Image (spheres, helix red, strand yellow):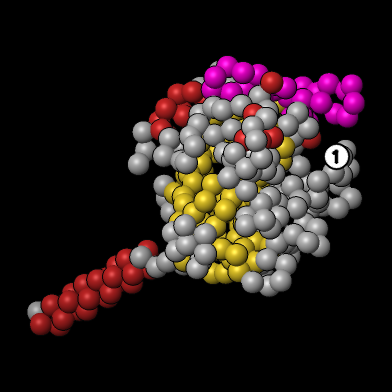
Amino acid sequence: MFRRSFLGLTVLATLLAFLLTGCAHQGSTRQTAGALGSGVQIAEADGKLIIKVNGADFTEYRYTGAPHVYFYPVIGPGGARMTRDYPMVPNSEGEEHDHPHHRSLWYSHGAINGIDFWSEGSKAGKIVHDKFLQIKSGADQGTIRSTCKWVAPDGSTTCTDERTFRVYTRPNNERLFDFDITIKAADKDLVFGDTKEGSMAIRVAESMRLIHGKNKPGDGHILLSTGVKDGDTWGKHADWCDYYGPVGGKTVGIAIFDHPSNPRHPTTWHVRDYGLFAANPFGLHDFEKKEKGAGDLTVPAGKSITFRYRFYIHEGTTDEAKVAERYAEYAKSK
């Protein structure tokens, strides 16, 4: 009897230790892909994080090898590649090789204290990965929290940021993720300059474009929450913007939601018929023909500013995907 009791206690102690070890792992700030292939899995690789949803490739966070960090590729419903391949694939076929700084999905701005962090020229600044605060896979969502330094051409740090990329487990006919960024001023005021070149941006797949060169109409469409469409959408204010068109023989779209808590909500949209799609609340001189500097936004020394966005990648047109309803859900989130 004693031997049976002892064995029973041993088994119980072993099981308890196993459960405690599993709980401790779940609480870790650095987690990689789950073995079962369900939920959101994030795996570390050389210079990037690989993100899967329910075992299917979704995107990669690339934080080395370029003047700024970015996400590429971005894969939507049914394996549709939602962003172009250039310049990540230098000799990509069937694409116009313009604007090499349009790297799939990214955040940057063309005038921070007078420094251009949007382009990639010799006089431009760089957005450099600093460290990861959290890498976490999960059944319902996966999270990447990281910090970056905005480095001027002279090597000094203009500002820093903390960004959160949160991917939700969704059915295979859609993808849903949030991008939140807090930009922190150092020991002097930080000025977001009045320029159209920014900020929360994605370059859509070539087949989704409204035009393909001069006088070559495409099959894509753009729609704002206000009802403004296609070529009239540039520089207009709206809660959300949806860019949709054909990829791989079916209609898919990308909607970007501007959270009501964002400065200058509803944002203005730097959205182009050739595939650039960006939320930019700063470029009022360009968008609205106001005096230069009208769009400047100053963050006092030692303070910070936060912007929150949601991306909804969907099948079908704006109406078919119920984009307005999905935005309403997001607008209620804290």
* Nearer-the-camera pick, 143 or 125: 125
Q: Mark 1: which secondary structure?
A: loop
Residue 75, x across and y down, in percent: 65, 42
- Residue 194, above or below 47: above
Name the magenta segment's main secondary structure.
loop
- Would you say residue 270 is visible in this rendering? no
From the image, tell me which residue sits under label 1.
Answer: 95
**Quarter of the image with the C terminus in it:** top left
Residue 291, x across and y down, in percent: 65, 35
At horizontal 41% and vertical 47% (from top left) the residue drawn is 140
> Pointer 1: residues within 10 angstroms few (<14), some, or many (20+)?
some
* Nearer-the-camera pick, 234 or 189: 189
At horizontal 77% and vertical 22% (from top left) the residue drawn is 219
Q: Is residue 157 left or right of residue 309?
A: right
> Magenta span has 51?
no
Q: Quadrant of residue 126?
A: bottom right
Q: Is residue 106 left or right of residue 258?
A: right
Magenta residues span: 207-231
Residue 251, x across and y down, in percent: 68, 25
At horizontal 70% and vertical 61% (from top left) the residue drawn is 125
